[in-house]
Each structure stands twice: as C-alpha cells, then as structure tokens.
Amino acid sequence: MSRRIKLDLSIILQKATEIADEQGLDQLSIGLLAEKLEVRPPSLYNHLDGLNELKQKLAIQGVKKLHEYMLRAAVGRSGDEAIRAISQAYLQLVRQHPGLYDASTRFPDANDQELQQAQESVVQLVLQVLDAYHLQEETAIHMVRGLRSFLHGFSSIEQMGGFGMPLDINKSFSILINTFIEGIHAATIHKDQNMEMND
C-alpha cells in the first residue's frame, strides 16, 4: 500500500504545474488534480476555494518563475549581452513551462497585490538592464513594453506551432532580439543628437 503524501499548497501547485505544462491549462481541473495527487477532490478545498483560485496562484507562480529565470540570466551581464540573456531566459521559461506561462497571461486577477508585485519585479529587472543605455525614463518604459511584445508574441506563436517554414526558429529569435537591440541604440543616438541641438 502506497504511503499517502501530506498535502500542502506547494505540492498542489507543483502537480497543477505539471498537468498544465504537459496537458495544457484548459485541461486542468480540480477532479484531475485530485486524481493525480491520489486524494479526494474535497481535500483540495482545504487549501483552495476552487479552480479560479488555483489558476490565480499558478499565474503568480508563473510570473515569479519568469523573474527567477531572467534574474539568473542577467547576473554578471550588461548592455546588449544582458538583453540577449534575459530574452533567451524568457523563451526558455515558456518552452519548459508552457502551461504555467499560459496561466500567467490568461486573464488573472490584475488587482491581486501579490501578482502586481511579481509583475513589477520583472519590469524593474528589465529597467535595470536598460540602465546601461542611459535612456530617458519614458523611452525606457516604451522599450520594456516593446521587448515584452516581442518575447510574448514570438513565444506564443511558437507554442501554437505557428512557425511552419523549414527555417531555424532559434536563428529567427536571435535576429528579432538583435533588431530590438539596434532599436535601442538608435534611440540612444537620437537622444544624444537632441541634446546636442539643445546645447
């Protein structure tokens, strides 16, 4: 007879992440989760109010893990190298945890303070990386939005199997990020030219 595990929230989220990553977020249910944990569904309600709360907690965990991946990649790097590293880390997270990433982008409760803090930590990390370019604050925010759009768009299309042409996807990603970096340098030059005109 197998020994029953002691259920807690971390174990529940770990198993829910596995299900979402392997089968897709839409397949995740309280019934399936209970089956995988070898417990009765009511046992899960001692830790969660229901499926919506479970998905909310997965969203928070997904954003935190994204920050973890990007922070680890950024350490010891700066400038262009750091941009490439955190971008690769973002793509790696989506490839390794597609369901968890999906949870973080599929309409979580935006008013959740813990989620807001996790999202802010990612934004601040990217802003710190952009410090090397000495951009104006407003321009830096635009760049954060642009990078997020690049990364989310590319990774989402890849997950949907949207890149059907027989070309190296990783090379396409590298070209995309290099193009973004060229845009940062162009913004820096433009700022310097404006400063010279105002002198």
Image (cartoon, rainbow, N blue to C red):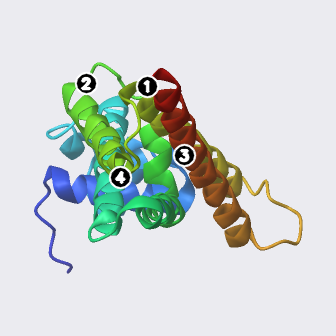
**Mark with earlier residue (2, 3):** 2
Of 97 and 66, nearer the camera is: 66
Residue 131 position within the rendered picture, expressed as x and y whole percent measured from the top left: 33, 46
Q: Say whether residue 4 is left or right of residue 182.
A: left
- The residues bearing labels 2 and 3 have C-alpha atoms spaced at a distance of 32 Å
Q: Mark 4, mark 2: which one is toward the viewer?
A: 4
| Callout 1 crowding tier (Cα within 10 Å): few <14, some 14–19, many ≥20 | few
Cβ atoms at labels 4 and 3 below 8 Å apart: no
Residue under label 3: 184
Which residue is label 4 attached to?
A: 132
Identify residue for label 2.
112
Quadrant for residue 165, please give it.
Answer: bottom right
Report the quarter where the C terminus lies: top left
Coordinates of residue 166 in the picture (x, y in percent): 88, 72
Of the residues shown, which amino acid type is indicated by label 1?
Asp
Element marked by disc 4: helix
Relative image position of residue 84 (x, y in whole percent): 50, 64
Q: Inspect the image, locate mark 4, and give the three-letter code of the amino acid beneath it.
A: Ala
Q: Does the CB distance between marks 4 and 2 fall below 8 Å?
A: no
Going from the N terminus, do you reach mark 4 or mark 2 first? 2
Where residue 117 appears, x then y in whole percent? 22, 34
Q: CA distance from mark 4 to mark 1?
A: 23 Å
Q: Secondary structure at mark 2?
A: loop
